[in-house]
Image (spheres, rainbow, N blue to C red):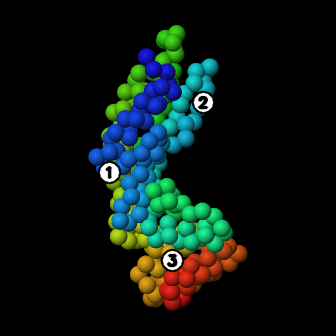
């Protein structure tokens, strides 16, 4: 019987197999799919180890990210400005602002793998393994669909624009994504909001310099 760590590796491999029909591929605990709109990623979270009455339990789940191509290009420009090597598209992450929005609590709570105290070999509790295995197809489907949905044309932008009180980070992403549509009143308005949202942060200056470099009138 597998111990908790072995069971974790086995379940991680099963998650990867379930993601393949959705177009995701990878190794270990990270799977990606590059589309025309950017890159979608599904990863296993970092493992949380806890101890109760001398018994170890592993907590883990899935997380997703969707990086529109326009955002990746902007961040690559920012890196170049600081003499940093750009990140390849298939390894890109961010903006990381709304990725898990809309996922219910039962899809985001961590799974738990406990030790079976009834066995001297300390295997993983079979009921925990069975629970994770039964939940995997539903969670994989939800995460894959969510990540790919955010890469559809303007999907990420539309969700950002729907926020009532956008933070400076959200406004920065809005400006970058709106710029794909060229100059216009919406872009001007977003730039104005960004410039006054947090004047001590470099976000507005970075975006304006980036847009001017791309010959977008600002």
Comparing labels 1 and 2, the label whose residue is closer to the camera: 1
Q: Secondary structure at mark 1?
A: loop
The reply to whether residue 201 is in sight is yes
Tell me which residue sits at (61%, 70%) in the image. Answer: 80
Q: In the image, is 125 to the left or to the right of 168?
A: left
Tag 3 secondary structure:
helix
- In the rendered image, which quarter is residue 108 located in? top left
Q: Which quadrant would the C terminus be assigned to in this image?
A: bottom right
**Quadrant in which the N terminus is drawn:** top left
Which of these two is toward me, 85 or 172? 85
Graded by Cα atoms within 10 Å as few (under 14), some (14 to 19) or many (20 or more), the crowding at tag 2 reads: few
Instruction: State the separation of the CA atoms marked 1 and 3.
Output: 30 Å
Q: Residue at x 49, y 11 (%)?
A: 119
- Toward the viewer: 210 or 151? 210
Residue that mark 2 sits on: 50
Residue 11 vs 64, above or below: the answer is above
Q: CA distance from mark 1 to mark 2?
A: 34 Å
The residue mark sitting in front, 1 or 3, is: 1
Q: Position of residue 27 (x, y in %)?
A: 44, 42
Q: Nearer the viewer, residue 6 or 55?
A: 6
What residue is shown at x 36% (from left), y 49% (from top)? 24
Q: Earlier in the sequence, mark 2 or mark 3?
A: 2
Mark 2: which secondary structure? Answer: strand
Mark pair 2, 3: CA separation: 42 Å
Residue 175 - label: 3
Give the side of residue 180 with respect to residue 171, left or right: left
Circle 1 residue: 23
Local packing at callout 3 (Cα closer than 10 Å; few below 14, some 14-19, many 20+) is many
Q: Write down the quadrant of residue 194 in the picture.
A: bottom right
Query: Is mark 1 in CB contact (under 8 Å) with mark 2?
Result: no
Q: Earlier in the sequence, mark 1 or mark 2?
A: 1
Question: Exactly how many numbered labels are in the figure?
Answer: 3
């Amino acid at each position: 019987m597998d111990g908790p760590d072995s069971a974790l590796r086995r379940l991680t491999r099963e998650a990867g197999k379930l993601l393949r029909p959705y177009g995701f591929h990878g190794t270990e605990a990270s799977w990606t799919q590059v589309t025309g709109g950017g890159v979608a990623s599904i990863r296993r979270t970092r493992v949380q180890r806890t101890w109760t009455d001398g018994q170890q339990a592993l907590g883990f789940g899935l997380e997703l990210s969707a990086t529109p191509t326009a955002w990746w290009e902007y961040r690559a420009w920012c890196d170049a400005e600081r003499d940093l090597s750009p990140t390849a598209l298939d390894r890109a992450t961010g903006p990381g602002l709304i990725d898990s929005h809309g996922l219910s609590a039962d899809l985001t709570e961590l799974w738990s793998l406990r030790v079976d105290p009834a066995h001297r070999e300390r295997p993983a509790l079979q009921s925990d393994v069975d629970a994770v295995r039964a939940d995997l197809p539903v969670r994989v489907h939800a995460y894959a669909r969510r990540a790919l949905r955010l890469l559809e044309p303007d999907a990420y932008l539309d969700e950002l624009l729907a926020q009532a009180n956008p933070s400076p980070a959200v406004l920065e992403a809005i400006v970058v994504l709106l710029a794909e549509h060229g100059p216009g009143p919406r872009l001007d308005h977003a730039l104005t909001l960004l410039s006054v949202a947090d004047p001590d942060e470099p976000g507005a200056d970075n975006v304006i310099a980036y847009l001017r470099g791309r010959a977008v009138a600002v």
